[in-house]
Image: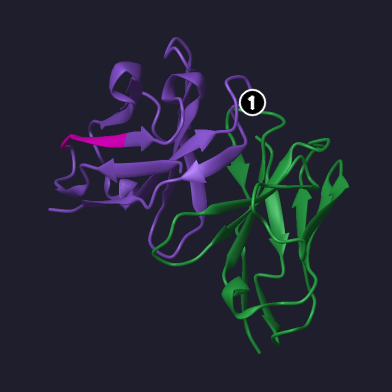
Amino acid sequence: EVQLLESGGGLVQPGGSLRLSCVGSGFSFSNFAMSWVRQAPGKGLEWVSTISISGSSTYYADSVKGRFTISRDNSKSTLYVHMNNVRAEDTAIYYCAKANSASQYGKLDYWGQGSLVIVSS
Amino acid sequence: EIVMTQSPATLSVSPGERATLSCRASHTVRDNLAWYQHKPGQAPRLLIYDASTRATGIPARFSGSGSGSEFTLTISSLQSEDFAIYYCQQYDSWPPLTFGGGTKVDIK
């Protein structure tokens, strides 16, 4: 059974930093692109970032470019997002999601339960 | 950026009835479109990809159609577990991957 488990969320002050992790199991983690998608309170889903299987290619939404860094450790089956200089508008539930192939990055076939990030002073 | 627009925002349906949800893209996305179901406190679930292909384990009452810029998700006979928010998402031209604003299907 495919499972994705996020962790690392919590309360962070504006301008602060936070790192979210997502551990994958039940599939060969190193063979699939991975993404982060978020949902702000009362809002819909918003794509944040995607990383290729090797980590050599990364993609970001304009709203987080230059502040967030996506990475992965295939030896640990773990996806990360480092969030720097966070803003109130980054408050959201952050989901990690698995692409359904190494090359088809956009079809997200499994998602985690999410990790809540609250940016507030 | 391709903008995805879903309608209606809310759809009130009785159990056993048919539900039809619409999704429009600002530019053609060919058939590179997915539908997701999302319930509060749960992980989103992939229902349909490539506009009309059901994902693994998805019941046959869910079907997707359309291509280019107009798409439809149909739930043929709503079950109690189908009341949720549904999102369409394009993956034809990215970054960014873009989602529609969602359609909430609630009980009439």
B76 vs B12, nearest the viewer: B76
Q: Quadrant of residue B101?
A: bottom right
Chain identifier, colour green: B
Is A108 colored magenta in this rendering?
no
Image location of residue A46, percent across then percent down? 50, 46
Residue at the spot 50% in from the left edge and 25% down from the top edge: A33
Q: Which quadrant would the N terminus of chain B be assigned to in this image?
A: top right
Residue B57 in view? yes
Q: Residues within 10 Å of mark 1 (few under 14, many from 20)?
A: few
Q: Which residues are magenta?
A: A16-22
Where does residue A25 sit, x and y in percent of width and height? 38, 35
Mark 1 belongs to chain? A
Q: Is residue B12 above or below residue A46?
A: below
Q: Nearer the viewer, residue B1 or A6?
A: A6
| Residue A62 in sight here | no
Residue at (32% x, 46% y) in the render: A90
Question: Is residue B19 toward the left or the right of residue A78 in the image?
Answer: right
- Classify residue A78 as left or right of residue B43: left
Q: Which residue is mark 1?
A: A104
Residue A50's spot in the image, x, y percent?
A: 48, 27
Q: Main secondary structure of the magenta part?
A: strand
Q: Viewed as shown, does residue A7 lie left or right of B65?
A: left
What residue sits 75% from the left and 55% below the top? B23
Rendered colour, chain A: purple
Which image quadrant for residue A54? top left
Q: Amino acid at mark 1?
A: Gln
Location of the C terminus of chain B (image quadrant): bottom right
Number of numbered discs overlaid on the protein picture: 1
Q: Residue at x 38, y 53 (%)?
A: A113
Q: Position of residue A40 (x, y in %)?
A: 39, 55
